[in-house]
Image: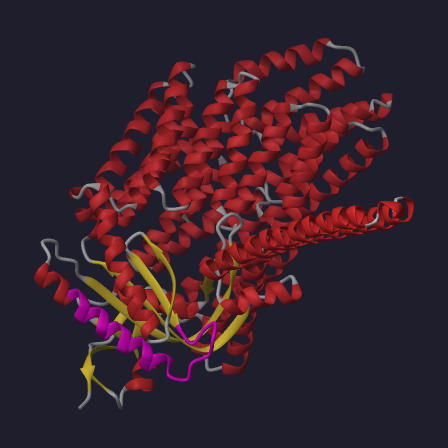
Amino acid sequence: MRRIIYTLFLFSIFSFSFSQSIIDSLIDVTKSLDDGKDKAEALNVLSKECFYARSAENCIKYANEALVLSRGIKDYKQEAKALNNLAMVYSAMNDIETSTKFVNKAISISEKYELKAEEGQAYNIKGILLEQQSKYSESLAAYKKSANLKREIDDKKGLSKALSNMAEIYQHWGIYDKAIEISKESLKLKHEIGDKRGEGILLLNLGNNYFYSDRKDVAIGYVQKAIKIFNEIDFQIGVSSCLNAIGLIYETMEDYENAIENYAHALQIEKKINNKSGIADALNNLGNVYTLIKEFDTAIVYYDKSLEVRTEINDKLGIAQSLQSIGAVYSVEKKEYIKSLSYYKRALKINREINNKKETALNLNYMGKIYMFMGNYDEALKLLEESKIIAHQIKSKAVMSTNYELFSKVYKKIGMYEKALDNHEMYSQLKDSVLNESIAETINELQTKYQTEKKEAQIVLQKSEIAKKVAENRRQKAALIFFIIGLVLVLGLVVVVFKSLQRKKRDNKIIEAEKAKSEELLLNTLPSKVVSDLKLYGKTEPESFENVTVYFSDVVGFTNMSSQLEPKLLIEELNDIFTAFDDIMIKHECERIKTIGDAYLAVCGMPEPNSNHAENMINASLEIQNYLNDRNNAADLTWRIRIGIHSGKVVGGVVGVRKYIYDVFGDTINTSSRMESNSEPMKINVSEVTYNIVKEKYKTVKRDPLEVKGKGVMNMYFVEGKLN
């Protein structure tokens, strides 16, 4: 949800809210032109401006006029532009099928008549379409094709756009370093062409990447740089978008007071410049914050105000979003299902009117869920079936995943367990499919790097062999020609051979040393089994492990402590604690996966299977608990942690491009995180699954069943020590 909100902030920058007077002027210019090349070009410009002004109907109208006219006069360049405009607007409306038809025609014409600028634009739009269908690898390939075409014609503006879209794919995969690298390249291009507004937008995008890589302080710094540029060029819509972005950062940090302050400041700017669209977005953001702090009546007031403004400007996409937000509050928070349905039905009607298939499918899913809560299972199944058909039409894995999950829950409610299981399996397969796509790209890059280094080493060895043969040939030839020199020549040749051998030995030592360094680096970042696979086969595949116990902990009150301690001291303290944790985990045959700020994630039972995975992890947790108690008694600073443990199936694989890591995925990871968040300071909270494995060996205390987000009611146990 938050990713969607942040994307809306960025979208508001590109929707520059052009005044109607500018569009009217363009219409007058177009009418004054005779039917010909100039008029076709003017119609295309007008179509694009209507797109930026969020007037989809007029965008389609003028693009179609340009298309008919350009075909009549055989102006293939303007024909390709018109097709791109149509593809662009239908993509924004989530009509993937129609948009794809237009963009493929644009590519065909552009390739035939060597219109590289239009072809580059078409591939950029095609990348967007593939991204909308969650085909991220194919999308990235399309963006790269667009970038290459733009480089050929030295179109820095178009190249910058393609690079920004490539960065978005890497951001989706969580490869933030790569996304940041590409965004900085795009930023440099914007600076070279003097596009100040573009610079500001790229700085905001970089803030977005740092935000998602959990470097929020750096993110705020980049957004503040964007604000400075936008103020220099008096681009107040950009300033407002930055304030919204900073508000979102504070919102995710649960600093709701600062979030509200920034959203309110953004609202003030939008009101000052009378940007109705921006006013509606800022009001909607305030509604989101008040929903999070459970002031639901206030949230609904802001959502209603946002709805009122969006209705005034006839922003149908925004109207549907506001209606859905209000419906969600009444459904999830206030449990007023009838009222919630009335808002969702209004949103559904609008989404159908504008042919927004993705949101239509999501609407149907939300309504199906409400009917499930109300016990009207027939209506729930009917709506979910309609959503399923649309989701398959638009090939949206995210919507299909939600759909199958809800189907499973409804069938379980009515006792149709076989169908419930079938749909749950489909839900799991879709989740795995998205995971595999995300991992595939990083694995491919690792394999390419490995093969390149391997070939370079082979070349060095081959050169050494050639040098040896050349020396040997020279020696033999010299011996035949200068045989009469006798012993002197023999001695000289011995010296040459000796030096050649020494040189070869030295080269081999260098190669072996570099190879040892590479292997040591890999072993420090990847499990030995993964490194072995890479060496033997040149690749590694993600693996699924059935019996794994997952440990998750975080520091109690870390946010307050981090704000009070000097950064150097904070890092030293965390380093000291996590180093001790690492030693304890190794001692008990457990594997630390990663740390995220104050959070610590470890597993036992992978990548090497371990039949005592649960017992080992609990022993490690008890020792960590004792270590912290002893440390707190002797040190000035007191550190307390919450520990959560769960056992089950886990997928493991290599992720990352610049900094390779072995990471873990699956519902077991999420559940262990829930165990941690529902634990108490200096307590070890285990799930019922883990408890059933170790209950004969440890002293435990059963807790009252708790409602767990996304899991329902769960039984949990505190582990207090070993049984005598």
Question: Does 681 appear above or below 503?
Answer: below
**Left or right: 125, with 361 as reference point:** right
Give whichever of 716, 650 is nearer the camera: 650
Q: As drawn, which residue projects farthest toward the right?
A: 481
Q: Is residue 324 magenta?
A: no
Classified by dominant secondary structure, the portion drawn in magenta counts as helix
Residue 615 coordinates in the image, percent (x, y) = 32, 82
Is residue 22 in view from this perspective? yes
Give whichever of 289, 306 is nearer the camera: 289
Please report the bounds of the magenta region as a residue range. 604-628
Q: As drawn, which residue projects farthest toward the top?
A: 32
Residue 428 coordinates in the image, percent (x, y) = 52, 69
Residue 700 coordinates in the image, percent (x, y) = 20, 82
Total numbered labels: 0
Question: Does 105 appear above or below 227?
Answer: below
Give the residue displayed 48% in from the left and 72% down from the top: 607
Give the residue displayed 19% in from the left and 88% down from the top: 723
Give the residue displayed 49% in from the left and 72% down from the top: 408
**Left or right: 514, with 81 as reference point:** left
